[in-house]
Amino acid sequence: MLLFWRFPALKSGLSLASELTAAHLFVLFLILVLAWTAGPLTAVLLTAFACLFSVYLALALREGAFWLQVGLNAALYLWALYYLLNLQRRSNDKDIAVEKLLEEIHLADEERKKNVHLQKVLDGKVERFFDLQRFSGELKGLPALEEASKKIVQEVHAVLDRAEHCALYLVDEGAQRLSLVSSSKREEEGPIKEKEGSLYDQWVMKRSQGLLIGDTRNDFRFAAETGESGWRLRSVCASPLVSESKVLGVMRVGSSRPRAFTTDDLRLLDIFSSLGAVTIRNILLYQKMAELAVRDSLTGLFLNRYFQNRLTETVRQADTRTRFALILLDIDWFKRYNDEYGHAPGDFVLKSIADTIRDCIGPGDLAARYGGEEFIVLLPGRTRQEAGLTAERMRSAVEASRFAVRRVEGRVTASFGVAAYPEGGRTAEQLLWKVDNNLYEAKRAGRNRICGSS
């Protein structure tokens, strides 16, 4: 229509029907172009407009062909609409497929990262297993308790590197208390002052179970714990050393930072504690067996052969300034006491006198069972007069002792001989002969007395 309006010459040669037909074709062309470019919704609207325009032409020109055009327009544009919708659906399907593919790629990447992490964890566990195997082998070759304790603490502190300090306590069976045997700490940390353990260590020892505290300030169980260095402790991980259902000690690591340890750390500490418990138990058993080899099973004092070796070594190392003394004592009329009361009461007397000797000597002195009812004591650094004073304390204590046997109160006395180096002899044989001679001199003088101290 714009073409005919622009050029009147052309318009003059055409009928009204021809102009409307040309306009109709132009509208159809415009609709087709817009339908392909604007999208399905625009195509539907334009198709509806084309149909209405065809109806208008059919009514205006009273031409039945335009009614057929209405149907053709509808069919044409419905087909175009279908094509466009199908094209859009395919595009949407492609977008969905791309999104799914990207999602699968993302999931595969996450799975890969997860597998890499799991591989690292597995490699770490394998490495840790071999470290534990190596550590176990190294512990087997350590016969000394101090050396083994130090090795255990160093290994634990190296593995649990978030710990600022590590401490190993062993249980004193007699007093049922803990005693610090080894520790490790950072250079900037002060010394561990809790030599007998903190409330945390006592808790682990009494309950024989591990302890993990993320923040000591929020744990009501230990609200009263202030320890000499407890104010700095925020995270605690501790495990008992258990062997044959018996607590041998406690291993503890700590940090001034809250939540420094995890349950995995506690499980690892349990493994170290188990390995350490086996090693420490074996060392303690070995020490006990070695001690039994040199100690008398009844009195707990050293055996005579051990005493002889120590005396020989002391004499060998002596010089002109060396002083030491010997005390030899024998229970008076002990055979008569055994015959009257029996061997069990006699054994009780022997153990009691051994306890009396231990109470009267110092930590550097050496007491041994010399014979059946004879005991001997080595006093390093003591003169003959000083040994005489020690012998008098023993004599008085033995004389004051009472032993209830079959509702009858019994008592015994003892005779003492004293000899000192170098005046009593310069060899072990000379000294033993001298102290033995002084003992029998006391017996000949009436028993319950001391000879050789003046």
Image (tube, rainbow, N blue to C red):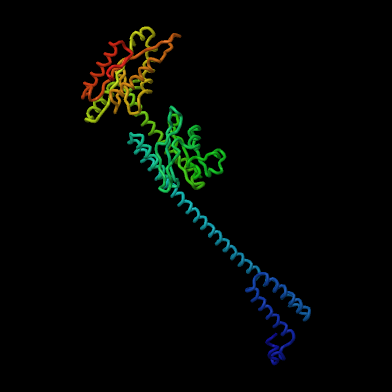
Q: Quadrant of residue 93?
A: bottom right
Q: Extreme top residue here?
A: 340
Q: Quadrant of residue 281?
A: top left
For the C terminus, the quadrant is top left
Looking at the image, which residue is at 64% across and 67% down?
Answer: 85
Residue 41 drawn above or below residue 330:
below
Residue 4 drawn above or below residue 194:
below
Q: Quadrant of residue 43?
A: bottom right
Residue 304 picture location, percent across and down: 28, 21
Looking at the image, which residue is at 69% across and 71% down?
Answer: 44
Foreground residue among 169 and 425: 425
- How many numbered callouts? 0
For the N terminus, the quadrant is bottom right
Is residue 422 rendered to the left or right of residue 165? left
Residue 162 picture location, percent across and down: 45, 47
Residue 370 drawn above or below residue 247:
above
Residue 293 visible in the displayed image: no
Foreground residue among 273 and 13: 273
Residue 26 picture location, percent across and down: 68, 81
Looking at the image, which residue is at 48% across and 46% down?
Answer: 256
Is residue 75 rendered to the left or right of residue 193? right
Residue 109 picture location, percent across and down: 49, 56
Q: Extreme front residue here?
A: 454
Foreground residue among 248 and 344: 344
Residue 277 visible in the displayed image: yes
Foreground residue among 60 and 252: 252
